[in-house]
Structures are given as structure tokens and as C-alpha cells.
């Protein structure tokens, strides 16, 4: 039996669970801290909506490049070391943005690219660890880990709103966040569980010689092979649709509230926080719905909720209705990404490979989303441009059946 197959002690499992929550929360806090300052960076650099979309594209490019590499890397280094390295890179990227935006667009592009690369690999590593913890716990917990991410984003957005209201400059704000990420995360994730061995490392007959003589290139080969699996690719499309709906809100809700409803920057940031709070609540209470009604029915129903919220946000006519729409939008998209990650990790032997592929496809939404919404916003306004999300929600509803568990649950 491999060391990673041994059941951890109850104390170790609790520590690993807390460490996984920390990884998700820290990732969300770091991202939302940046996102809360997008309007100020835009104003400093005098960017039009389409230009801002292209700047935000740098973050997505970094993530998309990191994601397909993360599966083989995690197979070799493990989720803990990978995440520790990416926390350091994330801190470097935030420092570059914090200082560089005072000089011009190019340093911001470089910093956002570094942040995006760190976010991509960090995302896969923490989801792989979350699946490992879920496997040892024997119950669904992945949506609550993602709720931890959302709690981090809410905290980051609320802190950002207060800091904006107090007229604190972008530079000291992001420098403090970078220092916190670099100091807290590498130590906080040390209790991670060992990753489950890749499929090629699990011998069919249990022979010790099969383990000791395994080709060291096999984990990477196994990771790349996941790109040929129909189910994995379709789950990726499902995640892409929900990632577009979630990512568009992350990047554009603050700007849309400010430009579309003529509010102050602080109110725009508060609208972003409303969306994140609603998404957090959906993720925290979502496991009960998933256990009772099954993945497919729940995500299809929530997709409809997101659509209603989107229409209210765009066509509500005043800030109060727009905030209510943002809340429905947040609840509606809350479970799409975590359900996709759980579906990809149904077989723990292939979790790293499949989560890497699914994340790679899903993050294409972050690659295409910012410039698409920016270009639409240039012609129809940033607020109306959010309606592009509706088309992707329809795609999610069409392919939602693919997230059924490999071992069917009741209600599926």
C-alpha cells in the first residue's frame, strides 16, 4: 500500500481541511483585492472599455498558459509545493502591479500576467487537494471549499470598498496584500495531505516491483492523456460557461454599476461585494441541494436563477434592483465551477490530470471574456454588454448532464 493511500489521522485530516480552506480563501482575497481597484487603475491609465478589456486579458493569458502545465507539475511536485511556489509568484505579480501602474500600462500587463500564471496553477493545486480531503472525509465538501474562496473574495472586496472610500492609494493597498500572501500561505498549507498517486502509479496486482520500477515520465504522460477523454472535455465546456458568467461579474460589475447607473466608485465596489456575498452563500448551502436533488437538476435550476438576475441587473432601472439582480446572478453561478471540479475528480487516480484539463478549458472564458465584454461595452455600454453571459448560460444548461457522478447518486 502506498503512503498516500493510508488513511490520515482525524487530527491530520482536520488540519488538512483547514489548510485547504485557507488556500481557497487566500486565493479569493488576493484576486478580489486587485479587482476592487480596477476602476482606479482604469482612471489612472485613462483606459476606454475596450482597452481595459485588453489589459484584463493579461491576467487570463497567464492563467490559461499555466493550467495545462499544472497537471504534470502537480504529478511531480505535489499540490502543496506547487501552491507554495505559486503564492510567492502571486505576491511578486501584485507588487509589480502596485508599483508599475504609476508608470504606465506595460508594467501592469507584466504584473497581471504573473498573477494570472500563479492563479492558474494555484487553482488546480487547491482543487486537487480539496478532492483528496473530500475522498478521505467520505462526504461532499468541495462547494464549501469554493465558498471559502468566495469568502475570501467578499473580504477582499469589502476591504477594498472601505479603502477606496478612505481614498487610500492603490500602491500601499496591493503591497500589503502581497506581503500577506507571501507570509501566510506557504506556512498555512503545510498540513496538506499527500496527493493520491496518478493512475499509472497504482499497480493492478499490488506488486511492489510495479511501483519501484515505474517510468518517471508516466505521471506526465497520464496527465496529458486526459485531453483525449470526451467526458473530461465536455465537463470543461460546462465549466467554461459558468466561468464566463462568474468572471464577467468579477471583472465588470463594479465598472457597470459606476458607468451604467452613475454611482460613485465606492458604490460600484459594493455592488461587486453583493455579487460575491450571494455566490458565497450559494456555495456554502449548496451541498445540501446537491445531495438531495443531484448535480444536474441543481445546476440547471441555478442557471435559470442567474439568467433572471442578469436581466434584473441590466434592465432594473435603478441601483437597488441592480443590486438584487447581482445577488441572484451570484447565487445562480455559485455551484457551476465547484460541481465541475468534483465531476472531474470523481476518479481520484486521475484527479490532477482531469482537473488540469477542465480548468484549462474553463479559464478560456477568462481569456475571451474581458475583451469581448469590453468590445461590446464600447458599442452598447458596459452595462448592456453583460447580456453576453446569457448565451453561455444556455450552453451550460445543454451540457449539464455530463456532470452526473461516475457512480450515480440518488436523484440523478
Image (cartoon, helix red, strand yellow):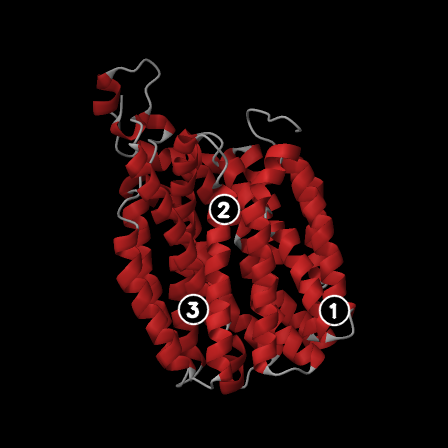
User: Which mark is on residue 354?
Assistant: none
The N terminus lies in quadrant: top left
| Residue 235, picture quadrant | top right
Crowding around mark 1 (Cα neighbors within 10 Å: few <14, some 14 to 19, many 20+) is some
Disc nearer the start of the sequence (2/3): 3
- Residue 369 visible in this rendered orientation of the protein: no
Disc 2 target residue = 144
Disc 3 target residue = 112
Q: Residue 250 in the image: x percent, y percent?
A: 56, 64
Disc nearer the start of the sequence (1/2): 2
Query: Is 400 situated above or below 171?
Result: above
Query: Is 217 situated above or below 161?
Result: above
- Mark in the foreground, 1 or 3: 1
Q: Relative to residue 133, is residue 412 drawn left or right?
A: right
Q: CA distance from mark 2 to mark 3?
A: 28 Å
Q: Relative to residue 389, is residue 44 drawn left or right?
A: left
Residue at disc 2, secondary structure: helix
Q: CA distance from mark 1 to mark 2?
A: 28 Å
Disc nearer the start of the sequence (1/3): 3
Q: Residue 255 in the image: x percent, y percent?
A: 61, 75
Disc 1 target residue = 321
Q: Relative to residue 365, is residue 72 drawn left or right?
A: left
Crowding around mark 3 (Cα neighbors within 10 Å: few <14, some 14 to 19, many 20+) is many
Q: Are marks 1 and 2 in contact (CB under 8 Å)?
A: no
Amino acid at each position: 500500500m502506498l503512503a498516500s493511500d493510508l488513511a490520515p489521522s482525524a487530527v491530520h485530516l482536520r488540519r488538512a481541511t483547514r489548510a485547504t480552506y485557507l488556500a481557497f480563501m487566500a486565493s479569493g482575497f488576493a484576486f478580489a483585492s486587485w479587482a476592487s481597484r480596477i476602476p482606479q487603475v482604469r482612471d489612472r491609465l485613462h483606459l476606454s472599455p475596450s482597452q481595459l478589456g485588453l489589459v484584463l486579458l493579461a491576467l487570463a493569458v497567464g492563467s490559461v498558459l499555466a493550467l495545462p502545465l499544472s497537471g504534470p507539475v502537480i504529478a511531480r511536485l505535489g499540490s502543496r509545493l506547487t501552491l507554495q511556489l505559486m503564492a510567492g509568484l502571486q505576491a511578486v505579480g501584485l507588487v509589480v502591479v502596485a508599483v508599475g501602474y504609476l508608470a504606465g500600462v506595460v508594467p501592469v500587463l507584466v504584473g497581471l500576467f504573473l498573477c494570472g500564471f500563479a492563479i492558474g496553477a494555484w487553482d488546480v493545486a487547491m482543487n486537487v487537494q480539496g478532492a483528496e480531503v473530500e475522498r478521505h472525509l467520505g462526504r461532499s465538501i468541495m462547494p464549501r471549499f469554493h465558498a471559502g474562496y468566495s469568502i475570501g473574495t467578499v473580504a477582499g472586496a469589502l476591504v477594498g470598498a472601505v479603502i477606496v472610500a478612505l481614498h487610500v492609494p492603490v500602491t500601499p493597498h496591493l503591497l500589503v496584500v502581497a506581503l500577506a500572501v507571501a507570509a501566510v500561505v506557504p506556512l498555512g498549507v503545510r498540513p496538506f495531505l499527500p496527493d493520491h498517486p496518478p493512475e499509472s502509479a497504482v499497480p493492478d496486482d499490488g506488486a511492489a516491483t510495479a511501483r519501484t520500477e515505474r517510468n518517471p515520465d508516466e505521471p506526465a504522460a497520464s496527465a496529458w492523456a486526459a485531453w483525449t477523454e470526451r467526458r473530461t472535455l465536455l465537463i470543461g465546456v460546462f465549466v467554461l460557461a459558468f466561468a464566463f458568467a462568474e468572471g464577467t461579474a468579477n471583472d465588470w460589475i463594479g465598472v457597470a454599476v459606476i458607468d451604467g447607473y452613475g454611482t460613485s466608485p465606492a458604490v460600484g465596489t459594493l455592488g461587486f461585494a453583493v455579487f460575491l456575498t450571494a455566490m458565497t452563500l450559494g456555495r456554502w448551502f449548496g451541498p445540501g441541494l446537491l445531495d438531495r436533488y443531484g448535480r444536474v437538476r441543481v445546476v440547471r435550476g441555478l442557471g435559470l436563477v442567474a439568467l433572471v438576475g442578469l436581466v434584473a441587473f441590466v434592465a432594473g432601472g435603478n441601483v437597488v434592483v441592480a443590486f438584487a439582480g447581482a445577488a441572484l446572478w451570484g447565487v445562480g453561478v455559485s455551484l457551476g465551477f465547484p460541481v465541475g471540479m468534483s465531476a472531474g475528480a470523481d476518479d481520484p487516480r486521475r484527479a490532477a490530470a482531469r482537473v488540469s484539463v477542465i480548468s484549462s478549458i474553463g479559464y478560456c472564458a477568462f481569456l475571451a471574456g474581458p475583451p469581448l465584454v469590453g468590445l461590446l461595452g464600447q458599442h452598447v455600454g458596459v452595462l448592456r454588454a453583460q447580456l453576453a453571459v446569457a448565451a453561455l448560460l444556455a450552453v451550460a444548461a445543454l451540457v449539464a448532464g455530463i456532470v452526473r457522478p461516475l457512480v450515480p447518486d440518488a436523484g440523478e
